[in-house]
């Protein structure tokens, strides 16, 4: 229910904002995310939004993060000569995360005061985060997949550099709060059990941004 309400709100925001916008914004970002429950992995995302004025932007973003882990054991083939390296896969584990967020970006124009094409900014984002955790243990014949979800918050500090009349590159560091949960029944007692997956962590990203002036 919470996810449905959020998606409806996002759709309404997408329809309303272009009417108010000075210019439309589009961006692609790539970097690293280091969550508490998994190792550092790539995170890639895209954003679309509007520039309300020279100091304030509003954007919607969708990011993709995935990290996998594999435990293996070497198998000795025996014999002589050239032998291949053989490994038995004992278990596989992976986590996939999709943060869908609305962002407010506060910019500090420096070109007017100092003549530098650098634009420092602070950004706050809020939205819904979805995650799938997959676990396979081949020795014990366990194949388990679980969905986690919850609201999250992201705070970022960064700077943009003007490379063209309507294009910028950016570098930012962020921290994302993402404590995701799921509820299920205990297999034996039948009592409700709440599980938590903490995907909170720091990250750093490079971005490429484009703008298009509104015809209004």
Image (tube, rainbow, N blue to C red):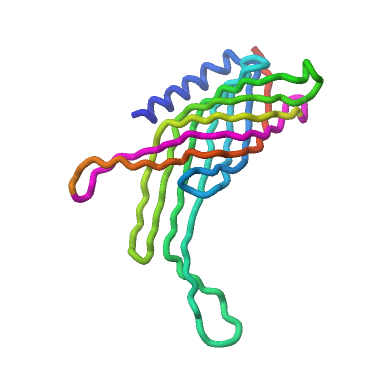
Tell which residue pokes out farthest to the bottom in this image. 80
Which residue lies at the image location 55% right of the left edge and 47% below the top edge? 40
Q: Main secondary structure of the magenta part?
A: strand
Q: Is residue 208 left or right of residue 147?
A: right
The answer to whether residue 32 is above or below residue 20 is below
Q: Nearer the viewer, residue 105 or 208?
A: 105
The spot of residue 160 in percent (x, y) is: 70, 29
Q: Nearer the viewer, residue 26 or 58?
A: 58
The spot of residue 171 in percent (x, y) is: 67, 34
The spot of residue 28 in percent (x, y) is: 63, 35
The spot of residue 67 in percent (x, y) is: 51, 50
The answer to whether residue 79 is above or below residue 108 is below
- State the quadrant of the C terminus: top right
Count of labels shown?
A: 0
Q: Is residue 165 left or right of residue 77?
A: right
Indicate whether residue 185 is drawn in magenta: yes
Which residue lies at the image location 51% right of the left edge and 84% below the top edge? 78
Which residue lies at the image location 42% right of the left edge and 45% below the top edge? 132
Q: Which residues are magenta?
A: 163-188
Indicate whether residue 166 is drawn in magenta: yes
Which residue lies at the image location 34% right of the left edge and 29% below the top edge? 1
């Amino acid at each position: 229910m919470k996810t449905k309400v959020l998606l409806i709100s996002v759709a309404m925001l997408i329809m309303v904002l272009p009417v108010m916008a000075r210019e439309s914004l589009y961006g692609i970002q790539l970097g690293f995310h280091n969550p508490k429950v998994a190792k550092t992995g790539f995170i890639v995302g895209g954003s679309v939004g509007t520039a309300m004025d020279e100091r304030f932007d509003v954007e919607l973003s969708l990011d993709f993060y995935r990290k996998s882990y594999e435990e293996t054991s070497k198998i000795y083939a025996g014999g002589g000569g050239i032998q291949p390296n053989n490994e038995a896969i004992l278990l596989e584990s992976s986590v996939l995360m999709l943060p869908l967020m609305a962002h407010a970006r506060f910019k500090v124009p420096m070109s007017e005061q100092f003549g530098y094409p650098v634009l420092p900014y602070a950004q706050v984002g809020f939205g819904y985060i979805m995650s799938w955790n997959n676990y396979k243990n081949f020795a014990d014949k366990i194949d388990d997949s679980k969905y986690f979800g919850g609201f999250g918050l992201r705070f970022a500090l960064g700077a943009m550099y003007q490379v063209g009349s309507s294009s910028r590159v950016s570098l930012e560091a962020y921290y994302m709060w993402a404590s995701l949960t799921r509820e299920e029944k205990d297999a034996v007692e039948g009592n409700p059990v709440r599980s938590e997956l903490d995907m909170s962590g720091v990250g750093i990203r490079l971005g490429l941004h484009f703008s298009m002036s509104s015809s209004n």
